[in-house]
Structure formats: structure tokens, C-alpha cells
Image (cartoon, helix red, strand yellow):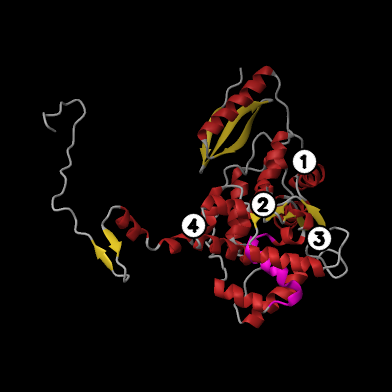
């Protein structure tokens, strides 16, 4: 009966077991429990005679197979384009010559370290490149090309926190005063709904519920064709203000119909080019308004900060922007929320009757109780004295 053992090498564990008269070394990762599971599984397969060798393919060969046979049908075209770029520019140049089954957790960690040392990619970009790597290796395990995912336990580099930018209400008004008349409805909709650029460009008149004052986000535009929104949560209904509804109604009356029923279309009735729109309309409007340069996506942040400032419920905000979870909303905008809660301490005092406001606006602070209640502590297992 075959027997093996576990050995720790640096931060990772390796399992060693006999195979065809030789010792087989297999790197697992930093989890000893996982290493024990892998060793048990390998020995059981060897003893039962069901152990089989892994296919001999290189990282590049499997990457091309994964893109061709899995990604083209399982993910959106925009995501596919991103994965192709990460593989072509970074992952294949590093792992491409290696046999897929020989890649270890240490190799993946070395990739992260070298990318950091090069300084050409930010920590966030490196973490983004790990997304297709992990997904691809997970499929490799599922298809029988790997026994475990060597990228599973990789330590991600810490990302530098970048403060998001947004316009204040005064800056929003100034910006809208300086956009061209033709695109005023487009930018007003962006500011007052927080829709992503692709969602705006894919909006159809049939998505607007005039009676109930709602805009339904049902699709996005990418690469000149419709696709489903970013996530399931992105399919949503956004409350439309009276001002926005009035503006869009007037805009519809003067807009020529188009075959795709687009709300925002070119003069020829075709899809608008998002990049061209930012370059020729958005950035020039910021310059004319004398405002700093921001990203188009920052109009989405502007919408959220306005909702926060007017005291909207966080769960409602999540539903309006289409975040998959409320945690995403809190993580992304939590640092803005304390600014709207500056008087929380005073409200707590008011709740307990320690302070109140007089008619002239001055505040009177109530005196604390003359006697402080005595805190009685009862030790479990003891009796209380009479009267306590």
C-alpha cells in the first residue's frame, strides 16, 4: 500500500507520494489541511489503481483552448476582451512556456512580486490580472488538466486607496449650463440616474415608464451591440425626477425616430460612440465651466453622493445604482457618509433629553442627574441580597 507525507517548503506545503517507483512532488499551498486532503486523495487513487496522469499542455496552449471553448460562450464580449488583453500582455509572457501541471503556488506568487518590482502595473491592475488567471485554472481543474488550482492562495498586493471624485450640486449646475444643447438631456440623465455610460447609450424609449416615473435598465451597449448589464443587480428600476421626465419628454418630441428606438442616438439614428462623446462633449463642457477634469464615471459617483447628502437609505441607494450587494455600496461610499452625520452626537443627546434647541437657535444643555445610579454586579451562582 502506497504511503506519502507532507513537507513544508517556505510558506507552502508540498505532498510527496510514490508513483511508478519514483517520488512525486506536488505543491499545494499554504493550507496544511488542504495538503492533507490532497495527499489522502492521491494515495487513495494510487492504491485503487485509478490514478491517471495529467495532460501535457503548456500554459499558453490551455489558455487558447479556454478562451476558445469556454469564454466565447460563458462570458460577455467586453469581459472576454479584457481577459484576452491580460493573457496576451502579461500572463502568457510569464507562464506561457511552462507546462500547466508544473505551475506551483510559488510561481504565481513570483508573478505578482515581479510585476510589483517592475512598477509598470499598479497593485489594482495586478489584482485584475489575477481574475482571469484564477478563473482559467479553476476550469483546468474541472476539465482534468490540473488537480488543484495553484493560484487559489496567492497573496494579493495591497491596493492604494484612491479617493473618488464627484461634483457638488453647484458644480453640477455649472457643468450642465456649459454642455451643448443637443446633449443636455444625455448629461442630465447621467447626473440624475447614476447610469453607467454603456447603460445610457443602450437606453430605449420603451425602458421609460412615464406613468410611474421610472427608468428601467435592461441592457448595455458595448462594441456597437447590446449586451446584458454588468451584473444581475444592474437590472433595475431608477426613480425619475419630474425635471428629468419633463426634459426627456421635450427631447423625444424633437428627436427623429430610429430603428433601434434609442433614446440617445446619433443624427443618423445609429449608436453613439461613447469615447467620442467624452472627448468632444464631456471634457470640453468641463473646461468651459472652469471645472477640474473628472472621468465620465464620476457623474455616477456624483449621483450617489447627492442621494447620501439628502439622507436616502443605503439599501435604496444600492438598488438605484445596481450594486450586487449592499456591502459594495458601503465599501465604495462609506467614507462619504460621515460628512452627512456631523450632528449625530447632538441628536443622541436630544434623544436622551440632554439637549434641545430654543426658538432663537441657541442650544441649552440639560444638567446631568444629581446622583449617578449604582451599578450592581451579580456573580453567577450567588444569591441576591433582599432589596437588591
**x, y percentage for residue 372?**
15, 49
Q: Is residue 193 magenta?
A: yes
- Callout 4 secondary element: loop
Q: Earlier in the sequence, mark 4 or mark 3?
A: 3
Q: Is residue 230 left or right of residue 170?
A: right
Mark 2 surroundings: few (<14), some (14-19) or many (≥20) residues within 10 A = many
Count residues near mark 3 (Cα–Cα under 10 Å), then give few for <14, some for 14-19, many for 20+.
many
Alpha carbon of mark 4 to alpha carbon of mark 3: how far?
A: 35 Å
Measured in 3D between alpha carbons, the distance from the residue under mark 3 to the one under mark 2, in whole angstroms, is: 18 Å
Q: Is residue 84 above or below residue 23?
A: below
Of pointers 1 and 3, the one earlier in the residue sequence? 1
Q: From mark 1 to mark 3, how far is it between C-alphas? A: 47 Å
Q: Which mark is residue 334?
A: 4
Magenta residues, dominant SS class: helix
Please give the residue where the numbered disc 1 appears in the rendered image: 57
Mark 3 = which residue? Answer: 262
Looking at the image, is mark 1 or mark 3 nearer the viewer? Answer: 3
Residues under labels 4 and 1: Cα distance?
Answer: 46 Å
Q: Position of residue 18 (x, y in %)?
A: 63, 26
Mark 2 secondary-structure assignment:
strand
Asked if the magenta segment contains residue 120, the reply would be no
Quarter of the image for the C terminus: give it.
top left
* Start-end of magenta stretch: 179-196
Q: Are marks 4 and 3 in contact (CB under 8 Å)?
A: no
Tell me if residue 291 can be seen: yes
Residue 315 x, y percent position in the rendering:
54, 50
Residue at x 67%, y 79% (from the top left corner): 178
Residue 99 drawn above or below residue 50: below
Q: Position of residue 109 (x, y in %)?
A: 59, 49
Q: Which mark is residue 237?
A: 2
Amino acid at each position: 500500500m502506497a504511503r506519502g507525507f507532507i513537507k513544508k517548503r517556505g510558506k507552502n506545503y508540498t505532498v510527496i507520494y510514490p508513483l511508478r517507483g519514483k517520488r512525486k512532488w506536488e505543491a499545494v499551498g499554504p493550507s496544511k489541511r488542504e495538503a492533507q486532503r490532497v495527499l489522502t486523495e492521491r494515495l487513495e487513487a494510487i492504491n485503487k489503481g485509478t490514478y491517471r496522469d495529467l495532460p501535457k499542455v503548456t500554459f499558453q496552449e490551455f489558455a487558447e483552448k479556454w478562451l476558445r471553448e469556454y469564454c466565447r460562450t460563458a462570458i460577455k464580449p467586453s469581459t472576454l476582451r479584457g481577459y484576452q488583453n491580460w493573457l496576451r500582455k502579461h500572463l502568457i509572457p510569464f507562464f506561457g512556456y511552462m507546462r500547466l501541471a508544473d505551475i506551483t503556488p510559488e510561481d504565481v506568487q513570483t508573478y505578482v512580486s515581479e510585476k510589483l518590482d517592475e512598477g509598470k502595473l499598479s497593485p489594482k491592475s495586478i489584482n485584475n490580472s489575477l481574475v482571469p488567471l484564477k478563473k482559467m485554472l479553476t476550469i483546468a481543474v474541472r476539465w482534468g488538466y490540473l488537480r488543484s488550482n495553484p493560484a487559489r492562495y496567492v497573496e494579493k498586493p495591497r491596493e492604494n486607496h484612491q479617493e473618488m471624485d464627484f461634483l457638488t450640486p453647484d458644480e453640477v449646475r455649472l457643468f450642465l449650463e456649459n454642455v451643448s444643447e443637443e446633449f443636455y438631456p444625455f448629461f442630465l440623465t447621467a447626473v440624475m440616474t447614476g447610469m453607467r455610460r454603456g447603460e445610457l447609450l443602450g437606453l430605449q424609449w420603451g425602458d421609460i415608464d412615464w406613468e410611474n416615473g421610472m427608468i428601467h435598465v435592461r441592457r448595455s451597449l458595448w462594441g456597437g451591440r447590446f449586451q446584458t448589464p454588468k451584473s444581475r443587480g444592474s437590472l433595475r428600476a431608477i426613480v425619475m425626477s419630474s425635471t428629468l421626465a419633463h426634459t426627456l419628454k421635450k427631447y423625444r418630441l424633437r428627436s427623429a425616430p430610429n430603428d433601434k428606438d434609442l433614446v440617445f442616438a446619433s443624427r443618423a439614428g445609429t449608436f453613439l460612440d461613447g469615447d467620442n462623446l467624452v472627448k468632444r462633449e464631456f471634457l470640453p463642457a468641463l473646461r468651459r465651466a472652469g471645472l477640474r477634469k473628472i472621468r465620465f464615471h464620476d457623474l455616477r459617483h456624483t449621483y450617489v453622493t447627492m442621494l447620501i447628502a439628502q439622507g436616502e437609505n443605503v439599501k435604496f441607494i444600492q438598488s438605484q445604482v445596481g450594486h450586487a450587494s449592499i456591502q459594495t455600496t458601503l465599501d465604495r461610499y462609506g467614507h462619504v457618509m460621515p460628512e452627512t452625520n456631523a450632528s449625530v452626537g447632538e441628536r443622541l443627546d436630544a434623544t436622551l433629553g440632554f439637549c434641545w434647541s430654543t426658538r432663537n437657535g441657541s442650544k441649552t444643555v440639560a444638567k446631568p442627574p444629581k446622583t449617578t445610579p449604582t451599578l450592581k454586579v451579580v456573580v453567577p451562582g450567588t444569591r441576591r441580597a433582599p432589596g437588591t
